[in-house]
Image: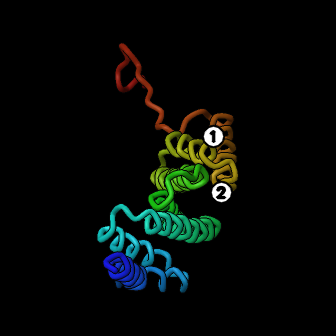
Amino acid sequence: MQYAITGGLGTILLCVLAGCASPELKQAHRLAEQGQWDQAVAAYQDAQKRAPFDDKIRQQLDQAKRAAAAGHYALGKQAYEEHRLADALHEFKQALGLDPSKAEYQAMIADALRMKQSHDQLQAATKLQNLGRVEEALSAYERAVELDPTQTGALARITELTKEQRATKRIGGSEEPLTLRFQNAKLKEV
């Protein structure tokens, strides 16, 4: 008789505990069903704090993290293709933070950084050219092309500056003012 009561009470207790998922877990499931993965990750993390040894919650959290990472990666790819490099970097970093096992996320961060550096070099080169610092501008354009060989603007500027330099050298050499020094000569003789 005591087994029947204890067994029945245990069954009821188990059913109650299984049916009474925490509010955080219920919210996490709802958010995951709606495809709101970032919020689902946060809710699963809250649920995991209440039950840190629950493998099912951990698995659901991992699944939500992978789905959220894939969403951020897709947004990053779109921003990258639209040349919004700061946004792309942000999204790729979010994706990598959620799922560090994906090598493609790391590769896209490297590509986006390289493109951003190329763009920065192009802007610096343009400023240097406008200041008349042609050699430095030429070097900056070359660095921009090294980072991104598809930089047609930088390639055009390199060609333009090189032609100008060759024309200057053919005509008379330098753009620097010519200073003549006559030793042992008097002003009237010069």
Query: Is any part of residue 115 visible from this angle?
Result: no
Q: Residue at x 55, y 84 (%)?
A: 33
Quarter of the image where one finds residue 142: top right
Please provide percent x and percent y for residue 92: 52, 61
Q: Is residue 112 above or below residue 56?
A: above
Which residue corresponds to mark 1?
A: 165
Q: Is residue 99 above or below residue 188?
A: below
Under circle 2, the secondary element is helix
Please provide percent x and percent y for residue 27: 41, 84
In depth, the one of 158 and 75 nearer the eye is: 75
Dot 2 crowding, Cα within 10 Å, few <14, some 14–19, many 20+: few
Q: Residue at x 49, y 69 (%)?
A: 60
Specify which label sits upstream in the sequence, 1 or 2: 2
Which residue corresponds to mark 2?
A: 153
- Looking at the rendered image, the quarter that the N terminus falls into is bottom left
Which residue extends farthest top? 184
Q: Tag count in the figure?
A: 2
In depth, the one of 178 and 77 nearer the eye is: 77
Query: Is any part of residue 158 visible from this angle?
Result: yes
Q: Amino acid at mark 1?
A: Gln
Q: Amino acid at mark 2?
A: Gly
User: Seen in the image, is 165 located left or right of residue 185?
Assistant: right
Q: Residue at x 65, y 66 (%)?
A: 81
Under circle 1, the secondary element is helix
Looking at the rendered image, the disc whose residue lies closer to the viewer, 1 or 2, is 2
- Looking at the rendered image, the quarter that the C terminus falls into is top left
Please provide percent x and percent y for residue 149: 68, 47
User: Seen in the image, is 30 located left or right of residue 147?
Assistant: left
Q: Are marks 1 and 2 in contact (CB under 8 Å)?
A: no
Q: Residue at x 44, y 58 (%)?
A: 97
In depth, the one of 190 and 70 nearer the eye is: 70
Please provide percent x and percent y for residue 14: 39, 78
